[in-house]
Image (tube, helix red, strand yellow):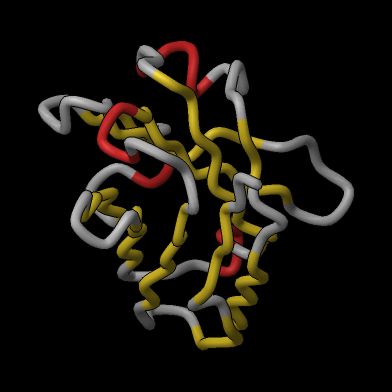
Amino acid sequence: QVQLVESGGGSVQAGASLRLSCAASVPSFSTYTLAWFRQAPGKERESVAAIHWSADQVSYTYSVKGRFTISRDNAKNTVYLQMISLKPEDTAVYSCAAKLFGSLQQARASDVDYWGKGTKVSVSP
């Protein structure tokens, strides 16, 4: 059974950093393009970042460029989202997703095979 399990969320003040992790129990993890999404209360889900299965391409939504970094460790079947200079508008439930041999465009468009349940990030002013 495939599972994506996020961790690392929490409540922080503006300007702080957090690193989210998503551990995946998928076979051949290295063949999955991975993405992070977030959904703030009362808002639609938003694509945040994606990393190609070849690990040579990444993509970010404009509002997080320069502050968030997506990376993956294929040996640990884990994808990370390093977040710095957090802002109150980053408050949301963050979820990871996986797409077998997916393109960055597919992954960021929510065209994925698996979803995690999410981890909550709260940023206070």
Q: In the rendered picture of this protein, how many numbered marks are placed on residues? A: 0
Above or below residue 59? Residue 49 is: below
Residue occupying the point 34% across, 53% down: 79
Above or below residue 104? Residue 16 is: below
Q: Is residue 80 left or right of residue 89?
A: left
Q: Give the x, y percent position of residue 55.
A: 16, 33
- For the C terminus, the quadrant is bottom right
Closer to the camera in the image, 27 or 87: 27
Q: Residue 88, located in which quarter of the rendered image? A: bottom right
Q: Give the x, y percent position of residue 64.
A: 38, 46
Q: Give the x, y percent position of residue 114.
A: 62, 35
Closer to the camera in the image, 76 or 47: 76
Q: Residue 54, located in which quarter of the rendered image? A: top left
Residue occupying the point 26% across, 62% down: 76
Q: Give the x, y percent position of residue 47.
A: 54, 33
Residue at the right extreme? 42
Above or below residue 51? Residue 57 is: above
Q: Is residue 15 left or right of residue 14?
A: left
Residue occupying the point 42% across, 66% down: 21
Closer to the camera in the image, 105 or 29: 29
Q: Residue 123, located in which quarter of the rendered image? A: bottom right
Q: Is residue 75 left or right of residue 22?
A: left
